[in-house]
Amino acid sequence: MKDFLSGLLDWIYKKRCYFCKSSKESVRMCSKCYDELDFLPVQLNRAYNGVKIYCAGVYSKNLQKMIRGLKYHNQRDLAYYQAKFMYQYWEKLGIEGDFQIVPVPIYPKRKRQRKYNHMELVALEFSRISGYSVNFELIKRIKDTKPQYKLNKVQRMMNLENAFEVDKTKYINDKKILIIDDICTTGSTFEEMIKALNKENIFDIVCFATTTPFEN
């Protein structure tokens, strides 16, 4: 019934593309704007403690607007398109195995203020597309860190030091870990999460970001 009413409202009040404002397709991201998204070359972005880190695109144009819309402007429908973009790149990597998707957690206070964790929404959509399970309980952010974008590499590492705590009882033993985030700048967030997991003898990890500010 809920889906029917939602569909009826979409028909009466056509959705407009968040990017070009067209209502032709009645979606939040039309096919034209989606096709304008640029993928990075299919290659390793960096590695830390033997963990490979990949980035799907560059943080600019529609990708930047997509991430900011989902993260700061309550455009939750954009989670699907972000996950779709990531999965298209992920398929090209050809990484085999069964994964548990672990989105980068945000501090509980910030989640209450925002009312959602944008990367949890992306993780759920990525799970639907990939068939991988999601794991929101394995790792928590226990430190209310400052926003990272104004900090340099050293400041970012200090800001994130001991920011994450792992509950190994929530680890799904037969599945690898796929940590996902929206932006990878210096890699500090991934590195701190890797350290926290390694302390619990968890090593089978891949990190994957939607974007990086830097072209390979």
Image (cartoon, helix red, strand yellow):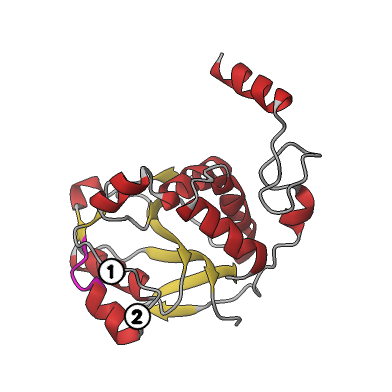
Could one spot residue 90 in this view of the protein? no
Residue drawn at (36%, 58%) of the image: 104
Magenta region: which residues? Answer: 160-164
Q: Is residue 161 magenta?
A: yes
How many tags in the picture? 2
Relative height, residue 7 to residue 15 (above, below): above
Q: Secondary structure at mark 2?
A: loop
Kindly indicate whether the residue at mark 1 contacts the one at mark 2 (C-beta within 8 angstroms). yes
Percent position of residue 16, x then y: 71, 41
Q: Secondary structure at mark 1?
A: loop
Task: Left or right? Give the position of 95 relative to 163.
Answer: right
Task: Left or right? Give the position of 9 relative to 210.
Answer: right
Which residue is disc 1 drawn over?
146
- The image quadrant where one finds the N terminus is top right
Instruction: Name the one closer to the observer, 182 or 178.
Output: 182
Task: Left or right? Give the position of 102 relative to 124.
Answer: left
* Residue type beneath disc 2: Leu
Which residue is disc 2 drawn over?
151
Q: Is residue 104 magenta?
A: no
